[in-house]
Amino acid sequence: MIEVENLFYSYTHDENYAVEGISFEIDEGEIFGFLGPNGAGKSTTQKILTGLLPIQKGKAIVAGEDITKVSGSFYNMIGVSFEQPNVYMKLSGYENLKFFASMFDVTTEDPYELLRLVGLEEVAHNKAKTYSKGMLQRLVFARSLINRPKIWFLDEPVSGLDPTAAAQIKELIKRKKEEGITIFLTTHNMHVAEELCDRVAFIDAGKIVLIDTPRNLKLRYGERLVKVEYKSDGKVERELLSMAKTTDIEKLNGLINSGKIETIHSMEASLEDIFIKVTGRGLL
Amino acid sequence: MMFKRILANVIKDIKLGWRGYFFLIVVGVALGYFLLISFVIPDEVEDGLKLVVYDKAEIILFPESENLIIVGSREDLEKEMKKDFNIIGVIVNASEKPNIELVFQGYESERTKEITKLAISKLFTDGAKNDKNVTIETLNPEISKKIPMNKWFLPVLLLMEAVLLGVVLVFAMSISEKTEKTQTAYMVTPGKALENLLGKIILFEVLGLLFTYILTPLVLGTDANYLFLTLVVLIGSFFATSFALIFATFYDNMSQALFPMMVAALFFALPVVSYLFPAFKPVIIRLIPTYPILIALKEAAFPWYIGSVNWQLLLYPLIMGALSFWLATVLYTKNARRG
Ligand SMILES: Nc1ncnc2c1ncn2[C@@H]1O[C@H](COP(=O)(O)OP(=O)(O)O)[C@@H](O)[C@H]1O
Ligand SMILES: [Mg+2]
């Protein structure tokens, strides 16, 4: 559904790239995640793929159309959710959805139904400027579904939401995937990537470092860890030991034999641990 | 499909305009101006009698004073009259009996003229019975049919508010859209820049006509040529709003935009100077598209002394409006893509 080849983008039109030679493919019905810290180039990539930024170098084909040549009808097929709450603040949530629905040539969703799905039905007729940050984000999210898109672009769909709202949105994304739509999702949250995505691309400083399923990433790069708490000279010490390092294994054995261990947990590496291992930096 | 989108944009912009109190402002300003015209600006300027005298007969005995200027030629006399539009010209011709010519500006009422005539003939001749010797001439004959001073301002007010209103408010609207970044959201729909901008054009057409239809009947009753007036306001507002839309794309916040916005509004108001002082109309001013609009507004407001209206006046502003609108759509697309 999406093919990207050697894409570059520089806001300053020089060697200072926001996106630097990225390539990937997304299959129909797949949720593809872009995981990386702030400033990695996730939003820039999404803007190029939705035609909001021009292609400077490289190639991008979305739903069979070369993105440099798309016309108005292309936008009937895609849905785009933004990081910023770009809605008309003087219009109500309902009026915002109604207005954007009128822009499409295809059958659109009922604005009330969408507002209900994201938990905004009670404030449907309040002006958007009275909404909280999280409510605005949910409105932008709901708006991206108004034209029943085949390809859905989600820029940080749950960042800034409280856990209940985030769970609601994640459920909705899973349901849409079951309906067969293709989803491009950016996030700096490893849990979101792990829970939702079929495949994840690690992006750092404009470059894709690796692409794989969360499970494969863990098998390939994740080291199993053991967290132990033990008594030493009357104080409780905590330590994280890797099962991939012989020195750590010997240390664990020593602790077990000494009988000083108070608690012991085995831990799976998170996507963030792997991200740090591969890129040398964290996600925040 | 295109029509559906234009309609949705118009409804949205009218809602935004309503909630931004644009309609209230327009009605308030129109009523305010009506009060101003009715009770504050006088029907005529009565500022004592101020004379400029060209004395060919050399019989004047009075010295120059604040209210009396003596000049040596007819050209100088007209020059003085252009400097001060309250002044009345007097030419004393050399002949057996002094023969007096009065030169009026054209704004003066019949009463002023009569009083002047009487006073002058008393001064220079042996009495009112000789007033046959006084002839009257008017510098600006087109305004001599006594349009009262206060009504004379109506076309200016129509230009400033009905036509140029959009200039200020469209800045406010575009900047609020930029802050909200709604243009970006609009760009990922099949909606076109043209459809979006037409919403604003039509909102300001509606507001311009609202102002016109409130103030004009209050001031002129049924005397105006309302068909022509409607057309002039539509075209004038189309031009001014389109032009402002071009400018608005360059600014991201109100404090940045304030100064250029004022400059743009003042620039478009320049033809008012030529309107108030008809002798002053350099090419530069006549090239500003609001110049023919102001002339056309005058024709629409006072059809009874101009005779026929000149539809061709509207061609230039219409063409300039279409060009500006086209440029505004190009810039809109560019601008939204950048953000
Ligand atoms: N409009 C812009 N103008 C200039 N630089 C920008 C702009 N938007 C983003 N950038 C820069 O491009 C890089 C990538 O940004 P972005 O794609 O927004 O990252 P992410 O979405 O991963 O946080 C960052 O260094 C950011 O500062
Ligand atoms: Mg981002």
Image: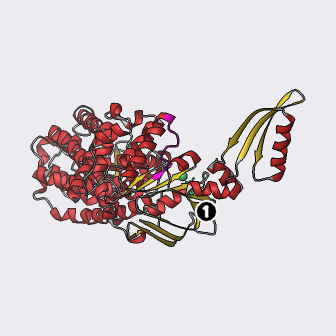
Q: Name the one closer to the observer, B307 or B119.
A: B307
Dominant SS of magenta comes to loop
* The residue positioned farthest toward the top in the image shown: A234
Q: Amino acid at mark 1?
A: Leu
Q: Position of residue A181 (x, y in %)?
A: 38, 56
The residue located at (11%, 52%) in the rendering is B227
* The residue positioned farthest toward the right in the image shown: A233
| B229 versus B334 height, above or below | above
- Would residue A189 be seen by someone viewing this image from the given angle? no
| A193 versus A69 height, above or below | above
Q: Position of residue A15 (x, y in %)?
A: 63, 69
Q: Position of residue B100 (x, y in %)?
A: 20, 52
Quadrant field for ligand 1: bottom right
Picture mark count: 1
The residue located at (29%, 62%) in the rendering is B321
| A143 versus B236 height, above or below | above
Q: Which residues are magenta?
A: A154-163
The answer to if A162 sits in the magenta stretch is yes
- Would residue B227 be seen by someone viewing this image from the given angle? yes
Mark 1 lies on a secondary structure that is: strand
Q: Which residue is mark 1?
A: A210
